[in-house]
Image (cartoon, rainbow, N blue to C red):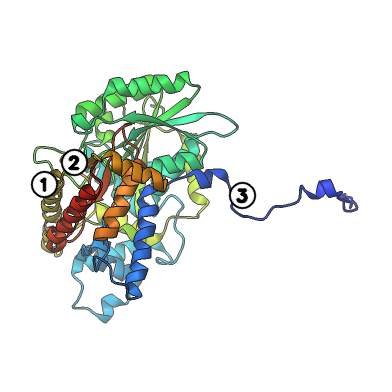
Amino acid sequence: MLRRTAPRAFSAAAGSLRGLPLDGTTINENVKSAKYAVRGAVLERSMELQRRMAAGEKLPFDTIVPCNIGNPHACMQLPLSFHREVLSLCISPTLASDLPDVFKKDVVDRAKAYAAGLGGGVGAYTNSQGIPAVREEIAAFITERDGHPARADRIYLTNGASEGVRILLTCLLRSGGLKDGLLTPIPQYPLYSASLTLLGGTLVPYHLSEGGNWGVEMDNLRESLATARAGGVEVRGIAVINPGNPTGNILAEKQIKDIIDMAVEEKLVVLADEVYQSNIWKKDASFSSFKKVACDMGYTGEEGDERLQLVSFHSTSKGYYGECGLRGGYMEVHGIGAEVRAELYKLSSLSLCSNTIGQLATGIMINPPKKGDPSYDTFTKERDDILSSLKRRSDMVHKALNSMEGVTCNQADGALYAFPRIRLSNKAKKAAEAKGVPADEFYCLEILDQSGIVLVPGSGFGQEEGTLHFRTTFLPAEETMHETLKRLSVAHEKFMDEHRD
């Protein structure tokens, strides 16, 4: 039987142990320390300029050009017809009967197939791991892509690839004062650095070789691992972004094999971020997944085969779909045992399930119309038009950047970005120091003020000491790209003239 006790009388000293308000001094320090450059100070300035323009203020430009983030639809890329039509019928099933002449048969059939597996429609929770029918579609896609079997029970649908990365890192990085770390490419997508900071992990950098078209140098990778371990860091895994963000490099199968060999030898979990696998621009290049190469090497990932532990990520946000706002994605685990898979399921269950529209969008992404389907011709034309335009825009951007004073830029073989190196004068660096900001951020802010173009400082991604970069997308609409590049060139020339030593 529980006994009631009188409330404890607090002394003045004890009163100091009472709860604290949430403010800037009591917030989790890891939250304050986390940085996410693609939505940092330069973007904040652009929003301020947008408000000033809306209030009628005259600026040197009349539009803000968002080159800071891979957000295709914000840059006027149109959605794919089949994808949106299927989603429309999933959200409003009566449209098929209300508008019988609008939707093609394969659109109606796909929506009906999804509805049969949803039970309560898109407004109901799904299985926490994701809609079973969609996971089966993903497994079929991976099997066809790689030539090796994939299993639906190894696939977890997530709110974009980013959520999958956070879930996996939550499992990987231990608490209790342990100094766990992750080998992370530099430059890197700041999701990794920010997530490591939030979770109390250690970023262990391995620098990509700018002179080697941003490739991975295995000697450098092993040296980074050894240095971290010597410093007391328990390195748990390695993140690989292929094709690269922000660098646009594509890993050859030989490089992937070398990384896998090292991961097996050193007992590292591989995090393969493969969201740009459909964005391949180099003529003789192709994408090979880590899963394919691992299976080719004999690491089957079957129950009990945990020699290689690999987690791969994909998303609806990139490729030729560009459906960032729908937040669709998945992760596939390979060589991960049943006990850990159960914990991944538990973490997925904390948010009950990923959003149903994103789950369906993921299924449509990896299972588009096939040859002979009524929607096939429209789909292939829309897809090919988007990809060919992106390739032309990539070429335009890289040509323009390499024509600018003090700028050099490797051609992007894949992904959606250019990551040029800029060489600034001592005068410019001192001006940045006087304002208390990194030199590359100062440059990006000045370019924004003159052109309205939003860039991201290279310091937000990490860069070799003594170098400066910025990242830009090549997503602005093709019909406006010449004008955008002209604005950038004029603003850059003005900056260089004003800051000559």
In this rendered view, identify the residue nearer to me: 488 or 80: 488
Q: Determine the CA span between mark 2 and mark 3.
A: 42 Å
Residue 104: x and y, percent? 18, 70
Residue 43 position by quadrant: bottom left
Please tell me how crowded label 1 is: few (under 14), some (14-19), or many (20+) other residues with Cα within 10 Å. some
Q: Quadrant of the C terminus?
A: top left
Q: Which amino acid does label 3 sit on?
A: Thr
Q: What residue type is labelled 2?
A: Gly
Query: In the depicted view, which residue is nearer to us: 465 or 446?
Result: 446
Q: 324 or 363, which is in the foreground?
A: 324
Instruction: Tell me the element at label 2.
Output: loop
Coordinates of residue 427 in the picture (x, y in percent)? 29, 42
Horizontal side of 165 relative to 349 (left or right) equals left
Indicate the amino acid at tag 1: Lys
Question: CA gap, disc 3 to disc 1?
Answer: 48 Å
Give the number of the mark in front: 2 or 3: 2
Q: Return the disc, 2 or 1, that comes first in the chain's sequence.
A: 1
Exactly how many numbered labels are in the figure? 3
x then y, percent, for residue 338: 46, 35
Label of residue 406 in the image = 2
Q: Position of residue 125 (x, y in %)?
A: 46, 60
Q: Do the residues labelled 2 and 3 touch (CB within 8 Å)?
A: no
392 horizontally vs 195: left or right: left
* Residue at 45% in and 64% down: 124
Q: What element carries label 3?
A: loop
Q: In this view, does 26 lie to the left or right of 271?
A: right
In the rendered image, the residue lying farthest to the bottom is: 98
Residue at mark 1:
399
- Tell me which label, 3 or 1, sits earlier in the chain: 3
